[in-house]
């Protein structure tokens, strides 16, 4: 009897509490992201800035480290049930969501966001017709990271290589260093598509035609594969399987360098004994391809507001006021997250911050690496992904590994194998 009475009282209390919670939630924004030390940290800093002028707004930042895309997809299929107000998407997956779920996101261009102040390449994946749905977050602006001490040990001057180089220049450098000290030039993760993707994007070439069909038979793709084959055949690649082995290769001095984005800086700095040894130079240019340049990208993500949000107006105002604003507080926010988490934003006015321009004692001759990568970012070509990007990525990655093993003899064979696997997976 007492249990039954207690249960009835609990239900009565619940009915009293729920309406008051709903009223309180009118000023609450929920954000989903997946890395508390990077994007989660950055969003907390943004919330602190916004709360200075909007203390009545509560911004809840939830860490969703596993299968965030699956959870979002389930919510979209349920008409928005259980979704947050704002979520972070990796740039390479958002096109699938925009295509498969029309009107799922708020058009932030129509809401007044000035996209002329963001890096142009970030806007491609989030754009559909005249609509732009995302607020760009971090850049994956890339460069070639090199050990200056290994260059010196080969009797060469590191300063001579701090410039725009072609891939042939890089191959020549790698051959000279290997001949002297035996070190391979680049750490290469055989389970990753990153290197090839960086190379192709640097030319502005797409992996797909405008109608979404696969297009791997391009000069950029053929030349990129030929360069990788030459690097591998000449022993200039250190082939490592998986992220951890790849990181160990360059952090432990097994290679002269690596090709990757600015976000790898934290990994480099995790080895303080390498201070003064690393330097970064622009992404090498592929010769003979129209539109090729010394800039590319790898990675990056952006923020989106769901149309199902009950607090759309507040969520939009929050993103606009902090992430897309040139107020002193907003610019200082970008400067703060750069130092606090190594998060380099793509809001162009933020590059004036002291942390962007300061010399960095960890690098050779105190190179101001953030300033350099921010400058290279402005020249990154746009890459469109399509819903089948992952299937293409995996097919090409697998074909490259077979080429390295000698099972695929030519670039043409490698492309044909990737096309066949892609068709088997997608039916297209």
Image (cartoon, rainbow, N blue to C red):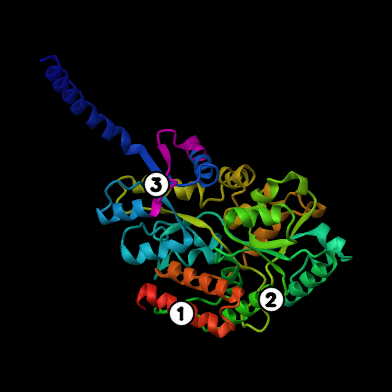
Q: Quadrant of the C terminus?
A: bottom left
Residue at (69, 71) in percent of width and height: 284
With respect to residue 344, does 141 lie above or below? below
Label of residue 233 in the image: 2
Where residue 197 sits in the image (x, y, percent)? 56, 69
Query: In this view, which residue lies farthest toward the left?
Result: 1
With respect to residue 270, does 233 lie above or below? below
Where residue 286 sits in the image (x, y, percent)? 66, 77
- Determine contact: label 1, label 3, CB under 8 Å: no
Question: Can you see residue 145?
Answer: no
Residue at (58, 71) in percent of width and height: 196
In the picture, residue 28 is in which quadrant?
top left
Is residue 61 shown in magenta? yes
Lower position in the chain sequence, tag 1 or tag 2: 2
Q: Nearer the viewer, residue 347 or 190?
A: 190
Where residue 4 sits in the image (x, y, percent)? 12, 19
Is residue 344 shown in magenta? no
Instruction: Identify residue for label 3.
Output: 315
Q: Secondary structure at mark 2?
A: helix
Crowding near the residue tagged with mark 1, few <14, some 14–19, many ≥20 C-alpha atoms within 10 Å = many
The residue range painted magenta reads 48-69
Q: Quadrant of the N terminus?
A: top left
Where residue 175 sits in the image (x, y, percent)? 79, 72
Label of residue 419 in the image: 1
Lower position in the chain sequence, tag 1 or tag 3: 3
Total numbered labels? 3
Crowding near the residue tagged with mark 2, few <14, some 14–19, many ≥20 C-alpha atoms within 10 Å = few
Residue at (65, 50) in percent of width and height: 267
Residue at (39, 78) in percent of width and height: 423
Q: Nearer the viewer, residue 98 or 315?
A: 98
Crowding near the residue tagged with mark 3, few <14, some 14–19, many ≥20 C-alpha atoms within 10 Å = many
């Amino acid at each position: 009897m007492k249990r039954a009475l207690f249960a009835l009282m609990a239900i009565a209390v619940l009915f009293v509490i729920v309406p008051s919670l709903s009223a309180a939630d009118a000023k609450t924004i929920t954000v989903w992201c997946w890395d508390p030390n990077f994007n989660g940290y950055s969003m907390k800093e943004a919330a602190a800035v916004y709360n200075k002028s909007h203390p009545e707004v509560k911004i809840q930042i939830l860490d969703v480290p596993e299968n965030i895309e699956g959870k979002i997809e389930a919510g979209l299929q349920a008409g928005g049930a259980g979704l947050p107000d704002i979520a972070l998407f990796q740039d390479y997956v958002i096109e699938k969501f925009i295509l498969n779920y029309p009107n799922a996101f708020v058009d932030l261009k129509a809401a007044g966001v000035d996209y002329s102040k963001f890096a142009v390449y970030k806007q491609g994946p989030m754009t559909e017709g005249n609509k732009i749905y995302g607020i760009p977050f971090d850049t994956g602006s890339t460069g070639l990271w090199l050990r200056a001490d290994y260059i010196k040990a080969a009797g060469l001057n590191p300063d001579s290589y701090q410039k725009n180089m072609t891939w042939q220049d890089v191959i020549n450098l790698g051959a000279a260093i290997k001949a002297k000290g035996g070190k391979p030039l680049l750490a290469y993760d055989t389970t990753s598509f990153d290197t090839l993707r960086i190379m192709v994007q640097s030319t502005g070439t797409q992996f797909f035609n405008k109608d979404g069909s696969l297009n791997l038979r391009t000069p950029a793709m053929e030349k990129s594969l030929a360069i990788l084959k030459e690097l591998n055949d000449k022993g200039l690649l250190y082939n490592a399987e998986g992220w951890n082995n790849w990181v160990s290769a360059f952090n432990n001095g097994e290679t002269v360098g690596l090709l990757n984005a600015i976000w790898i800086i934290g990994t480099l700095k995790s080895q303080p004994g390498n201070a003064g040894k690393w330097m970064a130079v622009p992404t090498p240019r592929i010769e003979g391809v129209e539109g090729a340049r010394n800039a590319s990208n790898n990675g990056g993500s952006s923020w989106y507001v769901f149309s199902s949000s009950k607090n759309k107006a507040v969520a939009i105002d929050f993103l606009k006021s902090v992430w897309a604003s040139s107020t002193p507080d907003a610019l200082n926010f970008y400067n703060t997250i750069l130092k606090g988490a190594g998060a380099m934003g793509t809001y162009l006015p933020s590059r004036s911050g002291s942390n962007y321009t300061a010399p960095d004692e960890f690098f050779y001759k105190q190179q101001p690496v953030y300033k350099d990568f921010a400058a290279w970012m402005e020249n990154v070509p746009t890459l469109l992904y399509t819903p089948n990007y992952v299937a293409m990525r995996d097919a090409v990655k697998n074909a490259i590994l077979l080429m390295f093993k000698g099972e695929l003899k030519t670039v043409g064979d490698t492309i044909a194998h990737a096309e066949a696997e892609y068709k088997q997976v997608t039916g297209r």
